[in-house]
Image (cartoon, rainbow, N blue to C red):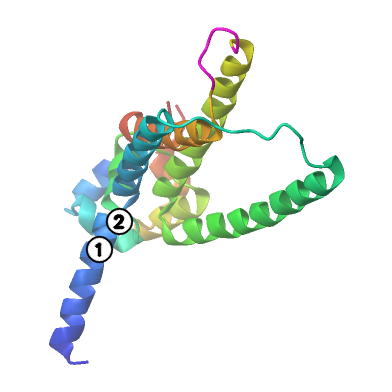
Amino acid sequence: MSALEKKTHQGLWRRICKWLKPDWIFLFLLAASVLLLVLSGTKTEVRSFEPPPLSPKLALLIGAMIAMSAIATFGAKLDRKHLDDYMFQMVANGAVIGIVTTLFVNMLWEIGSNILPPITNDDLIAVMIGSWSLGYFFYRWRGLNI
Amino acid sequence: MKNRLKVLRAERDWSQAELAGRLQVSRQSINAIETGKYDPSLPLAFKIADLFEMTIEQIFLRD
C-alpha cells in the first residue's frame, strides 16, 4: 500500500470512527426503539396455554443468564478499552437508567393490568433500548455530576 | 469537584483538541471536565497531572 493510499485509508477510517461515536449509535437506537413500539402495536403476542416443564426451562434460563452475563462482561471490558472514560461512563450510566426504567414500566403494567392495554416482550425491549438512549443523552446534556 | 484545567490549558495556549490529543481522549471529555460535567477517572487524573507536571491536588480541588 502506497503512502497516499495509506493516508486516504486512515482518513476514511477516522471519518467512520467519528460518525460511529456513541451519539450516533444512541440516536439510531432511540429511533429503533420508537419503530419497535410502533410495529409491536400491530401484532398480538400468542402465549401457549401449557407451560413447559419447570426444571429444564429453569436450567436453560440459568445457563443462558450465566453465559450471556459473561459475554456482556467481556463486551463491557472491550467498550471500556476502546471508548474513552467519559463516553464509557455515559453509556454505563445510561444503561442503569434503561434497566431501572424497564423494571418500573413492567411493574406499572403489572399493577394496572386491569386498566392498561397488554404489554408484550417486544414493547419492553423497545422501552429498555429507548430509555437507555434517553439516559445517555440526558447525561450528555446535563453532565455526569448531576 | 472544581478544577484548574481551563486556566492551565490557556497558560500553555493549547486548544481543547490539542490537549485531548496529548491525553489521548476525546475533545468532548476535555470540555466536560472543564465545565464540571464530569470528574475524570483516577488514571486520567494522573495522566493530566503528569502532563502539566503537577500533583492531582494542584489541578483538582474539593468543592
Q: Residue A124: horizontal and vertical position, in percent?
A: 52, 31
Q: Give the residue number, with chain letter if any, for mark 1.
A: A16
Residue with the mark numbered 2: A20
Q: CA distance from mark 1 to mark 2?
A: 6 Å
In percent of the image, x 30 and y 34: which residue is there?
B35
Q: Dividing the image into 4 quarters, which one contains the C terminus of chain A?
A: top left
Tag 1 near tag 2, CB within 8 Å: yes
Side (left or right) of A48 relative to A139 = right
Helix, strand or loop: magenta stretch: loop
Measuring from the top left, give residue A14's x and y in whole percent: 24, 66
- At label 1, counting other C-alpha atoms closer than 10 Å, the crowd grade (few under 14, some 14-19, many 20 or more) is few
Residue type (three-letter) at the residue carrying disc 2? Leu
Q: Position of residue B27 (x, y in %)?
A: 27, 51
**Which corner quadrant of the image does residue A54 belong to?**
top right
Q: Secondary structure at mark 2?
A: loop
Please say whether residue B18 is visible from this viewpoint. Answer: yes
Q: Nearer the viewer, residue A87 or A21?
A: A21
Give the residues in magenta.
A113-118
Residue kind at label 1, given as amino acid type? Ile
Looking at the image, residue A98 sits to the left or right of residue B7; the answer is right
Label annotation for residue A58 = none
